[in-house]
Each structure stands twice: as structure tokens, then as C-alpha cells.
């Protein structure tokens, strides 16, 4: 049925619930999970300034993806702890585009996202990640309802 699942996360409670639900589903199906997170580009000047504030041997760690990588690794560790095959992917740019691109590249069977931004008038905004994914995904989409 579903042998590969793409789940998006930004570390928010809604996204964490999406990851939790994707984990349960993947575990029951033996599916591979791709965890995707997007980040905004950071000006090189800001990165240079931040690098100067850390010891020289740790400066390599200051990069535009550093926060995203932390978020991805926390989620991946939980999935690996459940015995799942998981791959993390950080992409620069729009979160919905990142998730859609990975779903297409990996020929995913399912995309799982939280419903944040899908209530009331917000669901009509072009920038709503779950809304955009639900309309453009190359596969099935599961939108996890959270409070």
C-alpha cells in the first residue's frame, strides 16, 4: 500500500504530531520515511558574524541549515528508535515546495503534514503549506488534524 512516506516538519507541535502519525503508519506498514524540513536563505554577512562568535574549531557548524538539521535529527532519532528506515532532507526555500519536490524525487506513496493553517480564512491563503500540498502532491496526502 504505502512503502514510502514523506513527512514535513518544522519542529512545531503540529509538525511533531504529523511525524508521530507518520511513524505509527510506517511502523505498521514497514515503510521508509523521508523527513523534510525547509529553511530560509541566510545572508553570508550574518553567517560570517556568527562564525566569529564561536571557537575556530566549531565555526564549520555555523551554516544556514543548522537549526533545520537539529530539528531533523531529533525526529529521525525517534523513528530510528522505532526500527524504521529514515532519511532526512533539508531544503532551502518554501516548505511546501520542498515537501512536494522530495515526494516527487523519491516517488513517495504518501505525504503526511499537519493541518496548521487549514482553519477558517487561513485555508484560503496561497502560502498555506498543507493547502498547497493537498492540491499539488504527486501522491496521496494525509493531513493530520491537531488542536
Image (cartoon, grey):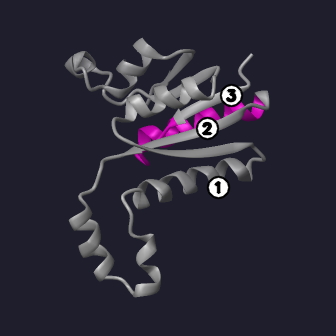
Structural distance between the alpha carbons of marks 3 and 1 = 18 Å
- How far from the left and from the top, in percent, is residue 79? 67, 47
Which disc, if any, is residue 77?
1
Residue 130's image quarter? top left
Q: Quadrant of the C terminus?
A: top left
* Marks 1 and 2 in Cβ contact (< 8 Å): no
Asked if residue 25 is among those painted magenta in the image, a careful observer would answer yes
Q: Residues within 10 Å of mark 2 (few under 14, many from 20)?
A: many
Q: How many other residues sit within 10 Å of disc 3, few (<14), some (14-19) or many (≥20)?
A: many
Q: Is residue 124 magenta?
A: no
**Does residue 124 lie above or below 54 as drawn?**
above
Where does the image place residue 6, in percent across and percent down from the top left? 58, 31
Q: Which mark is residue 4?
A: 3
How far apart are the two marked residues, 3 and 2, measured between alpha carbons? 8 Å
Q: Nearer the viewer, residue 65 or 109?
A: 65
Q: Nearer the viewer, mark 1 or mark 2?
A: 2
Note whether residue 12 is visible: yes
Labelled disc at residue 138: none
Farthest front residue? 44
Residue 34 marker: 2
Q: Give the SS element for disc 2.
A: strand
Identity of the residue drawn at 49% across and 56% down: 69
Q: Quadrant of the N terminus?
A: top right
Residues shaded magenta: 8-28
Residue at figure coordinates x 75%, y 43% from the top left: 84
Secondary structure of residue under mark 1:
helix
Residue 20 lies left or right of residue 49; in this view the side is right
Cα separation between marks 1 and 2: 13 Å
Q: Position of residue 50 (x, y in %)?
A: 28, 74
Mark nearer the N terminus (3 vs 2) = 3
Given contact means CB atoms under 8 Å apart, are the residues at marks 3 and 2 in contact? yes
Amino acid at each position: 500500500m504505502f512503502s514510502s512516506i514523506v513527512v514535513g516538519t518544522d519542529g512545531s507541535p503540529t509538525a511533531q504530531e504529523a511525524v508521530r502519525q507518520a511513524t505509527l503508519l510506517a511502523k505498521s506498514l514497514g515503510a521508509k520515511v523521508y523527513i523534510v524540513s525547509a529553511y530560509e536563505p541566510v545572508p553570508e554577512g550574518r553567517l560570517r558574524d556568527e562564525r566569529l562568535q564561536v571557537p575556530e574549531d566549531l565555526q564549520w557548524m555555523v551554516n544556514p541549515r543548522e537549526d533545520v538539521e537539529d530539528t531533523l535529527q531529533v525526529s529521525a532519532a525517534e523513528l530510528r528508535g522505532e526500527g524504521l528506515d529514515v532519511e532526512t532532507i533539508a531544503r532551502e526555500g518554501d516548505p511546501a515546495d520542498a515537501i512536494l519536490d522530495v515526494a516527487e524525487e523519491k516517488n513517495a506513496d504518501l505525504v503526511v503534514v499537519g493541518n496548521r493553517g487549514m482553519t477558517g480564512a487561513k485555508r484560503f491563503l496561497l502560502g498555506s503549506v498543507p493547502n498547497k500540498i493537498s492540491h499539488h502532491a504527486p501522491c496521496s496526502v494525509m493531513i493530520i488534524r491537531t488542536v
